[in-house]
Image: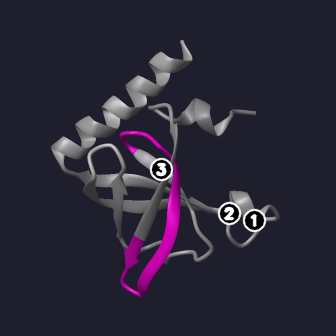
Amino acid sequence: MMNLDDRRSHRRTAVDWPAMVITAEGCIGGEVKNISPTGAFIHCFTEPEQQSPLRLVFRDPLRKKLLLITAELAWSNIESCNDIGSCGIGVQFTKIFTDDHLFLNGVTSEHLQMLA
């Protein structure tokens, strides 16, 4: 069976960044737990509508700058989650500013260098 990490085009980096997921229905508070230049896992307890685009807002502690990203829901385990610490959603980025994309590339690269 293929592991989810095997299907991803970029490795994820563990972070702990407060986040807000903005949907047509309202705002969902959560925390970004891992991130790559193309997607993220957000720990939260409310599942957004699958059809609507998501606006992600979070602040990286390194640059002290808000990242504003448009994404789509890739998956959710909220309805079937047995471990409160692993409940959340996976999102795939659909629009990201070039500077923010470069920053996320750098975060991932630095993390991989520390593991080597």
Work out which quarter of the rendered image holds the C terminus and state it.
Answer: top right
The foreground one among 54 and 32 is 32
Span shown in magenta: 21-38
Q: Residue furthest left?
A: 98
> Which amino acid does the dot numbered 3 rest on?
Ala
Work out which quarter of the rendered image holds the N terminus and state it.
Answer: top right
Q: Residue furthest bottom?
A: 25
Q: Residues within 10 Å of mark 2 (few under 14, many from 20)?
A: many
Q: Residue furthest top?
A: 116
Could you tell which of marks 2 and 3 lies nearer the N-terminus?
3
Q: Residues within 10 Å of mark 3 (few under 14, many from 20)?
A: many
Disc 2 to disc 1: CB gap under 8 Å: yes
The residue drawn where x is 40% and y is 24% is 110
The residue drawn where x is 42% and y is 87% is 25
In the image, is residue 101 above or below residue 77?
A: above
Label 3: state its secondary structure: strand
Residue 55 vs residue 14: left or right? left
Task: Identify the residue under disc 3.
Answer: 40
Residue 68 vs residue 109: left or right? left
Residue 95 spot, x, y in % from top left: 25, 54
Task: Identify the residue under disc 1.
Answer: 84
